[in-house]
Image (spheres, helix red, strand yellow):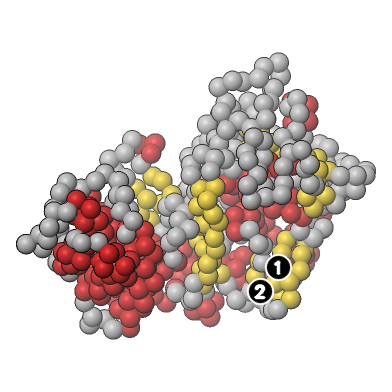
């Protein structure tokens, strides 16, 4: 491999990945990550979307060094090989790990002039100027954005340690914003129609099996081949050809292209004198061609039969205000064509894991709450307890109860929002107390009630307690439990106003009565 003489940093051998050994935290490179995976408890990367991207890269490398990427293996052979690997106490074969990272066809040098890791070296000649280091780091204001809550600005750019820069590099590849970024000239032309597309995981939430050690985690999260393999499967660092922005997209082969080859962004890091830090970056669009369709195995996929064919299937959006237990129905229910959603494909292979691994298996949730274009709200992560024993394949009654409770909790949240808005409208308009308990007036398209948001904020902790109580006591009424939680939340949110405002008490009483009535079909009530 050809690499820079002065600036050196290897993604394979230099430390940049945060991990946890018991109570000890340290950084390792990719090689050490795999050599010591059986002793590492978990990743400890501080930025959830970076960890989400790294887990996908690690899944492909795991398949490579264990030969679980062989498309000729039958499903039984594939599962048998994985079970055998999970029984090994010493983790991955060190010879296979070193052979992969020492392969001269694979380039892990971050500042290599010909094949920099996950970067496009042509950007230095195709872009007139770099984009600025603040453009790389999520959370820093860049360009004309105002620096209200940050000391960073483009007049005094602060370099970033290379270990941190690599993590933000992953975020751009997987969760990057749409837009062209820095203008790029390909050949003699600078395409004007290329606006830049958002990253393949933008605004989504991922679900990753989590084992007792990183070794178990990596083996549990390898997706199995479905269908037939077409073409040679290569990751960007395995491909001898440099990225070509005007070339047709490569087929979405398994597992490398699907998990690591769908980026819509091209980046090139500009190193400091010794490679220990990054002082600038080129950031622009990666390809003129639209991406080929592919299903990420860690996403919940929804189906809308009334949408256009190209928009019919879409991933579940991340929501930073949504607790992990509200996702359980999408994880535990087996695939069913009658449902409007399908659990992540990775969960279809978990029943074939050895029983000790399966019984202790948790789920790591990584979400990045964003809009579809450029605005980032918040990233988040969560870890569930061992839940696979509740899956429909193992305990269909409990899985059905969980699905019923989650659906009821969401439904009553919608009713609470709607009725809080109606109660406020009846209060300020002074219609008097409805004699039949029904709220009056035409529903507003968008609620302006100051009660709706506080009521929902008070509702969800109460709903969570009701949820676990309902699982422990199957004889309790699901509708009554969540209606009571919604009533308490509404009364909490309106405590002061029921004393201060003349019609508030009567309007809230009518809303409470409506909460306890069997729900009627009313589209406005289902709006969030």
Residue displayed at 20% across by 61% down: 502
> How many numbered marks, from 0 up?
2
Q: Nearer the viewer, residue 413 or 382?
A: 413
**Is residue 180 in view?**
yes
Q: Which residue is mark 1?
A: 19
Q: Mark 1 packing: few (<14 Cα in 10 Å), some, or many (20+)?
A: many
Q: Nearer the viewer, residue 11 or 434?
A: 434
- Tell me the residue that label 2 is attached to: 41
Q: Does residue 23 lie above or below 215 as drawn?
A: below
Q: Are marks 2 and 1 in contact (CB under 8 Å)?
A: yes
Q: In which quadrant of the rendered image does the N terminus lie?
A: top right
Image: 10 above or below 384: above
Q: Classify mark 2: residues with Cα within 10 Å, few (<14), some (14-19) or many (20+).
A: many
- Residue 200 x, y percent position in the rendering: 54, 44
| Residue depicted at x 73% and y 61% | 17
Q: Is residue 337 visible?
A: no
Q: What percent of the width, then of the height, locates residue 246? A: 63, 25
**Is residue 176 toward the left or the right of residue 474 in the image?**
right
Between residue 416 and residue 191, name the one nearer to us. Answer: 416
Q: Is residue 174 above or below residue 471?
A: above
């Amino acid at each position: 491999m050809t690499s820079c003489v002065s600036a050196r940093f290897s993604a394979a051998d230099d430390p940049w990945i945060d991990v946890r050994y018991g109570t000890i935290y340290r950084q390792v490179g990719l090689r050490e990550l795999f050599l010591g995976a059986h002793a590492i408890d978990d990743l400890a990367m501080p930025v959830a979307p970076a960890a989400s991207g790294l887990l996908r890269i690690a899944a492909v490398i795991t398949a490579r060094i264990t030969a679980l990427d062989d498309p000729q293996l039958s499903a039984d052979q594939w599962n048998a090989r994985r079970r055998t690997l999970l029984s090994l106490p010493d983790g991955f074969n060190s010879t296979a790990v070193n052979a992969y990272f020492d392969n001269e066809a694979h380039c892990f040098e971050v500042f290599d002039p010909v094949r920099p890791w996950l970067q496009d070296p042509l950007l230095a000649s195709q872009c007139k100027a770099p984009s600025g280091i603040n453009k790389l780091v999520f959370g820093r204001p860049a360009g004309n954005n105002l620096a209200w809550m940050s000391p960073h600005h483009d007049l005094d750019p602060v370099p970033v340690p290379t270990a941190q820069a690599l993590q933000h590099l992953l975020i751009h590849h997987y969760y990057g914003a749409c837009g062209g970024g820095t203008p790029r000239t390909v050949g003699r032309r600078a395409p004007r129609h290329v606006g830049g597309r958002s990253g393949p995981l933008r605004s989504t939430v991922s679900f990753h099996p989590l084992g007792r050690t990183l070794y178990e985690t990596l083996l549990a999260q390898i997706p199995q081949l479905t269908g037939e393999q077409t073409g040679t499967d290569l990751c960007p660092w395995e491909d001898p050809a440099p990225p070509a922005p005007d070339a047709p997209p490569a087929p979405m082969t398994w597992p490398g292209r699907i998990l690591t080859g769908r980026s819509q962004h091209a980046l090139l890091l500009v190193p400091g004198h010794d490679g220990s830090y990054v002082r600038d970056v080129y950031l622009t669009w990666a390809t003129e061609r639209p991406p080929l369709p592919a299903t990420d195995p860690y996403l919940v996929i929804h189906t809308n039969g009334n949408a256009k064919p190209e928009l019919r299937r879409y991933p579940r959006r991340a929501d930073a205000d949504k607790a992990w237990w509200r996702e359980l129905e999408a994880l535990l229910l087996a695939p069913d064509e009658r449902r409007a959603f399908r659990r992540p494909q990775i969960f279809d292979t978990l029943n074939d894991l050895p029983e000790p691994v399966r019984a202790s298996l948790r789920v790591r949730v990584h979400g990045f709450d964003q809009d579809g274009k450029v605005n980032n709200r918040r990233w988040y992560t969560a870890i569930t307890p061992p839940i696979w024993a509740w899956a429909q394949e193992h305990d269909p009654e409990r899985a059905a109860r969980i699905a019923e409770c989650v659906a009821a909790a969401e439904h009553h949240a919608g009713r609470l929002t709607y009725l809080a808005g109606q109660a406020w409208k009846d209060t300020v308009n002074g219609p008097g107390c409805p004699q039949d308990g029904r709220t009056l007036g035409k529903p507003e398209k968008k609620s302006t009630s100051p009660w709706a948001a506080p009521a929902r904020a008070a509702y969800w902790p109460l709903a969570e307690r009701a949820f676990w109580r309902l699982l422990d006591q199957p004889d309790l009424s699901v509708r009554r439990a969540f209606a009571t939680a919604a009533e308490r939340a509404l009364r909490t949110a309106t405590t002061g106003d029921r004393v201060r405002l003349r019609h508030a008490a009567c309007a809230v009483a009518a809303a409470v009565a409506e909460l306890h009535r069997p729900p009627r079909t009313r589209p406005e009530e289902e709006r969030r």
